[in-house]
Image (cartoon, grey):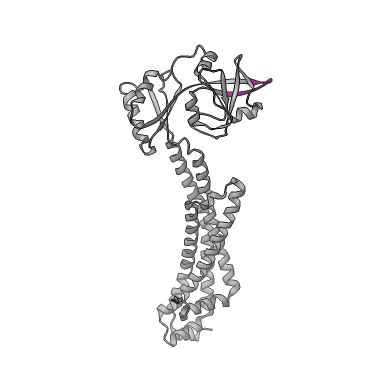
Amino acid sequence: MRIADPLKNNMYAELARRNLKRQSIRTILAAIGIIIGVIAISSMGILGNTMKLSVTDSFADVGDKLMIYPAPGEESITEKQIDQIRKVAGIDEIIPLRSHGERVEYKNEESFASVYDIKEEGLESLAELDEGRYFKSGSTDCVVGSSVAENLEISVGSKIVIDDSKLRVVGILKERGLGFDIDTDSGIFTSSEMYEKLYPDEDEGYSSTIITVDDINELETVQQDIEDRINRKDELITVFATNMITESIDSVFDAISLFLMGIGSISLLVAGVSILNVMLMSTMERTKEIGVMKAVGASRKDILKMFLLEALFLGVAASLIGGLLTLGGSYMIISFIMDDSAYILKFSNIIYILEGVFFGVGTSLLGGMYPAWKASRMKPLDALRYE
């Protein structure tokens, strides 16, 4: 069954198309203004949103964790407190650890790193191996982060020196980037026995504890249960939810996207003024034509419809072109800058393109509204006498 085009046999739609073609140079210039405006507002929104997606993806692995530290005035987290935490419902894994900043030497080269006492299974859940294996419990072996290995040119089997003690490197971790639990890239990880050999005078207890939960939606509930259980009388620990960071990042980048889109909307404002000018000039040039149309029975509504259709056709065509150019241009730029073009296909980025198209069409209609109203209010005799 053939579906008829409702505008194909519409006299006023045909007149609107004809009038746009008749002043083609003027129409093209007005369309360029809309295209630039749509590209500006859409690309600014995509830029801010892509930055937000990239950063939040970097923190995705730490957003479901609780970090526990000794409260101000407390020296460490005790084994008794760890046992109390284990009784809290909703916890998937508890990773207590000790850490110490230290110089690391290898072949007369030095670098600064954080030395961690962490259980093998705890390290496995927080970081991935790039090469080698994890250390065994009770051994003098260690696993190093990617930055440490790169800075000192360490490979699996190398022996590094920490405070006159030699540790054999049995594994190198994959680069993970910035995190708020542990610094895997600049860390050296070893067993409790080796750590105590390096720092025999260090107090018992843990410097921090990482907790992962079964359900990220219950993160705040688990946090409150831990605080209620341990800080019942005195504040002994501080519990920090890492999802607060991702929420703050979302808020900051949403504000950045809105600000950038505001800057881009200036281009659409200029385009709206351009359309207003084009339509007003078109109204003046076609004054006699409007008078003839009214004399043969065209109503104010018909004249208004014809001019608004001109603005609509111009806005839709130019906005769609601007949206397509934004999609193609953003794809190339994001691929070049971030080496990952998948971000452009995210639903939130597509929304920004649709918003740009919507604002482009809306701006065109607003720009054409006053000239359309003015044309519809003309009196037939005055229009026919116009020179």
Tell me what residue is drawn at x 52 percent, y 31 percent: 127
Question: In terms of secondary structure, what is the magenta stretch mainly?
Answer: strand
| Left or right of 252 on screen, residue 86 | left
Q: Nearer the viewer, residue 14 or 230?
A: 230
Q: Nearer the viewer, residue 235 or 78?
A: 78
Q: Position of residue 175 (x, y in %)?
A: 57, 34
Q: Position of residue 251 (x, y in %)?
A: 44, 43
Tell me what residue is drawn at x 47 percent, y 43 percent: 252
Q: Position of residue 386 (x, y in %)?
A: 51, 84
Query: Extreme right residue here?
Result: 108
Magenta stretch containing residue 112, yes or no? yes
Total label count? Answer: 0
Q: Nearer the viewer, residue 276 or 207?
A: 207
Q: Nearer the viewer, residue 42 or 178?
A: 178
| Left or right of 118 on screen, residue 24 | right
**Which portion, as a residue range, is magenta?**
105-113
Query: Extreme bottom residue here?
Result: 296
Quarter of the rendering occupied by the N terminus = bottom left
Magenta stretch containing residue 54, yes or no? no
Q: Image quarter for residue 146?
A: top right
Tell me what residue is drawn at x 36 percent, y 31 percent: 223
Quarter of the rendering occupied by the C terminus = bottom right
Q: Image quarter for residue 21?
A: bottom right
Q: Tell me if residue 214 comes above or below residue 352 in the rendering.
A: above
Tell me what residue is drawn at x 50 percent, y 41 percent: 57
Q: Position of residue 217 (x, y in %)?
A: 37, 39
Q: Tell me if residue 110 comes above or below residue 256 in the rendering.
A: above
